[in-house]
Amino acid sequence: MHSLMILSHIDDNALMDIGAFQAEKEFLRERLNGQCPDVQWRIYYSTLGAYDVVNLLNSEDYEQLMKASRFIQNFHGMKTEIVFATRWEELEGFTNPAVSAGTYCST
């Protein structure tokens, strides 16, 4: 399963009419469901920090996931950062061979 975390900053002008913003957000959700049916929009959080919104998308289909990320990037001209995400449990099986052998890089 591929996961993308999309960190977004919303343009101040986009929030002048919150009703219109909500309607466009619903349009975006319908567009994602229609054109990217294999993508699950797992999280949509508002945050208090460097970013205004955090979205988490999951899909087995990498191409649909990238298409969905473009829809979100173009929503209200948001400034976004896209980060590939991996569940911690999936990382537990991966180890750095040098670390697991007790050898560390030094300078």
Image (cartoon, grey):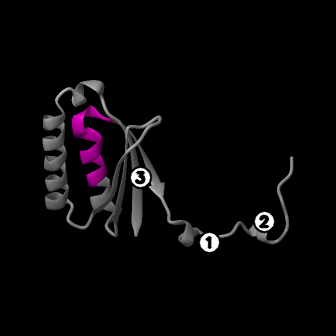
The mark that comes first in sequence, 1 or 2, is: 1
Q: Which amino acid, mark 3?
A: Met
What kind of residue is marked 2? Val
Say what amino acid the circle numbered 1 marks: Glu
- The residue lying toward the viewer, choosing from 12 and 91, is 12
Q: Earlier in the sequence, mark 3 or mark 2?
A: 3
Which residue is denoted by mark 1 in the rendering?
92
Residue 2 appears in which quarter of the rendering? bottom left
Local secondary structure at mark 3: strand
Do labels 3 and 2 touch, CB within 8 Å?
no
Label 2 secondary element: helix
Which circle marks residue 5 in the picture? 3
* Label 2: few (<14), some (14–19) or many (≥20) C-alpha neighbours in 10 Å: few
- Compute the Cα span from label 1 to label 3: 20 Å
Horizontal placement of 3 versus 64: left or right?
Answer: right
Mark 1 touches mark 3? (CB < 8 Å) = no
For the point 27% across and 53% down, which residue is it?
68
The magenta region covers 67-78
Q: Position of residue 71 (x, y in %)?
A: 24, 46
Discs 1/2, front = 1
Question: What residue is pinned by disc 2?
Answer: 99
